Image (spheres, rainbow, N blue to C red):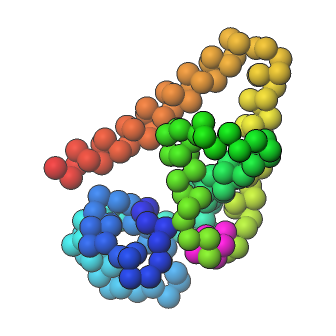
Amino acid sequence: MTGKGTAGVDGPSPHLFEDKIFILSPGEFTSSDTLDQSLQILEAIGAEAMTIDAGEHDKLVAAVSHLPYILQSILIHVPDRFDDERVWSVAAGGFRSMVAKAGDNPAMWKDILTTNRQDISLALSQMAQEINEFIALLRDGDDQHLSEYLLAARETHTLRVEGRLSRRSKTTL
C-alpha cells in the first residue's frame, strides 16, 4: 500500500512500490498464469505481494487508508470553527503532519471514497465510538483510564505500526 496523492506527470516514481504491500484481488476469471505473472512483476519491482478477496481489501483499506484521509480532512476544518485567525499561527509540526494528506488530490479521493461507501461508513462509525469513549474519559475526569487508553495506543503503535515496518525493512536488507 503506497501512493503519493498526486496526479499527472509528477505522480510516477520508479521506486514507489519498493518494500510496500501490493494487494492483488484476483477475480473468478483470473487465470493462474496471470496471477503468477503478476507476482513475478511485483517481485521484480521490489513489492511485497498480498492476495486477498476484493471485499476484504475494501474493508481493510477503509480502516487504515480511507479513514485517515477523512479524519485529516475533518481535522483541517476544526481550526476554522474557532473564528480566530491566531489558531493558524500556533499550528506547529504536529498539526501539519496530522493533516498532510488533506492536501492530496481531492478528485482522486472522491473517487476512492465513493467506491467504498459501506466499509468507510462502518470505519467512521467505529471511529465515532472511539471518540465518544474518549470524550467520556475527559468529561468524567477518569485520569486513570485516560492514562491506560493512551498507554494502550502507544503499545499498539509500537507493536503494530513500528514493529511491522521494522520487520519489513529487515527482510529487505
Q: Residue at x 73, y 37 (%)?
A: 130
In the rendered image, residue 81 lying in the magenta stretch gets the answer: no
Q: Quadrant of residue 39?
A: bottom left
Q: Nearer the viewer, residue 94 or 53?
A: 94
Horizontal and vertical percent position of residue 73:
66, 56
The residue at 54%/57% (across/down) is 101
155 relative to 149 in the view: left or right? left
Kindly indicate the quadrant of the structure image that contains residue 120: bottom right
Left or right: residue 117 compared with residue 156: right
Q: Is residue 111 magenta?
A: yes
Is residue 86 positioned above or below 6 on the image? above
Q: Which residues are magenta?
A: 108-113
Please say whether residue 5 is visible from this viewpoint: yes
136 in relation to 126, above or below? above
| The residue positioned farthest toward the left in the image shown | 173
| Residue located 35% across and 45% down the image | 165
Q: Please, is residue 152 above or below residue 49 in the view? A: above
Residue 128: tell me if it is visible: no
Question: Percent position (x, y) of residue 103?
Answer: 56, 61
Q: Image point 43% across, 33% down: which residue? A: 159
Q: Position of residue 12 (x, y in %)?
A: 35, 76
Percent across and percent down for residue 61 are 57, 60
Count of labels shown? 0
Q: Nearer the viewer, residue 85 or 33?
A: 85
**Dominant secondary structure of the residues highlighted in magenta in the image:** helix
Q: Quadrant of the N terminus?
A: bottom left
Name the side, left or right, on which 159 lies relative to 71: left
Q: Is residue 76 left or right of residue 19?
A: right
